[in-house]
């Protein structure tokens, strides 16, 4: 059964984070301009929105594709013409995000005697999911489901992403939003059934027991230690320590961060209060 995202909040979140983490676009304001295109479904995803990008209003069109189709350039051209007909004064940025399992073979342009049309294709095979997982933010974790899992098991990755989301997001409504995003994007990867299996397993799983635990372990080490320890700022060390309390024991934190173990124990005690 296909699932449509009907809430503006969810679609806005996905659009902003796709722009930030995948397309390298700094998107500010978003206004969706066509209800027919404001949807994410299994096998297909179309987003058309008026966005402020680097203080300039532009039309952003994103399509998520999980199989190679020879007529994609024609389809993108049709979208371009439809958008330009309604919004002639705006520049149109078009992206196709390919998440299929097979090697990308689709062309990104049409070259004919009287026509030259081109759009951009992002091949998610070239983006390692670890890159996003190590960012350790809810948005990056959700989007990592679109990336290449390399040689890692799908179930392991989904378990890690879902468990870590539960730890990072305290508010239940916010967690629900991220889970809806994750569920929706999982359909694009044909991972819906595996995600349901993961959701049923979560109560009996500890993060540190997951085979993929080492993927996320580096988040506190690389992101924090370089920032805090190299600068020698105790405040940074304390902040990093707090972020690691749920995933490392006191002695390991002390050794990695460079704080006396008594201080680590004190921070842990304060954190419980």
Image (cartoon, grey):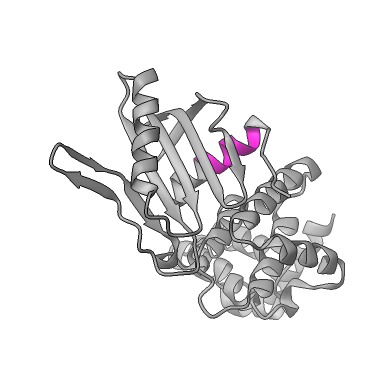
170 left or right, relative to 72? right
Report the magenta residues as a range. 9-15
Of residues 119 and 23, the one nearer the viewer is 119
Question: Residue 214's spot in the image, x, y percent?
Answer: 61, 78
Q: Residue at x 58, y 50 (%)?
A: 139
Q: Is residue 154 magenta-colored?
A: no
Can the viewer see residue 245 in this picture? Answer: no
Q: Residue at x 83, y 69 (%)?
A: 201
Q: Is residue 185 above or below residue 215?
A: above
261 left or right, relative to 38? right
Q: Is residue 51 above or below residue 97?
A: above
Question: Residue 73's spot in the image, x, y percent?
Answer: 34, 46
Of residues 60 and 171, the one nearer the viewer is 60
Question: Residue 32's spot in the image, x, y percent?
Answer: 52, 26
Question: Residue 143's spot in the image, x, y percent?
Answer: 56, 55
Can the viewer see residue 214 in this picture? Answer: yes
Image quarter of residue 19: top left
Figure quadrant of the C terminus: bottom right
Q: Residue at x 71, y 61 (%)?
A: 162
What's the magenta bit mostly, secondary-structure-wise? helix
Of residues 45 and 160, the one nearer the viewer is 45
């Amino acid at each position: 059964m296909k699932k449509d995202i009907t809430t503006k909040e969810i679609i806005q979140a996905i659009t902003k984070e796709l722009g930030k983490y995948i397309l390298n676009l700094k998107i500010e304001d978003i206004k969706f301009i066509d209800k027919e295109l404001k949807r994410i479904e299994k096998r297909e995803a179309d987003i058309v929105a008026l966005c402020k990008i680097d203080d300039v209003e532009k039309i952003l069109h994103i399509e998520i594709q999980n199989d190679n189709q020879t007529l994609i350039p024609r389809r993108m051209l049709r979208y371009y013409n439809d958008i330009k007909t309604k919004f002639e004064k705006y520049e149109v940025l078009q992206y196709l995000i390919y998440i299929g399992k097979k090697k990308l073979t689709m062309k990104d342009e049409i070259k004919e005697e009287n026509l030259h049309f081109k759009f951009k294709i992002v091949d998610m095979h070239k983006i390692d999911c670890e890159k996003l997982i190590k960012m350790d933010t809810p948005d990056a974790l959700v989007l990592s489901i679109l990336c290449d899992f390399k040689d890692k098991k799908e179930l392991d990755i989904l378990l890690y992403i879902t468990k870590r989301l539960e730890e990072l997001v305290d508010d239940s409504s916010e967690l629900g939003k991220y889970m809806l995003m994750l569920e929706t994007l999982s359909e694009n990867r044909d991972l819906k059934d595996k995600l349901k299996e993961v959701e049923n397993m979560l109560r009996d799983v500890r993060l540190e027991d997951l085979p993929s635990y080492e993927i996320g372990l580096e988040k506190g080490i690389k992101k924090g230690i370089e920032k805090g320890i190299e600068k020698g700022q105790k405040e940074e060390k304390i902040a990093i320590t707090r972020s690691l309390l749920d995933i490392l024991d006191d002695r390991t934190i002390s050794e990695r961060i460079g704080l006396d173990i008594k201080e680590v124990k004190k921070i842990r005690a304060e954190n419980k209060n």
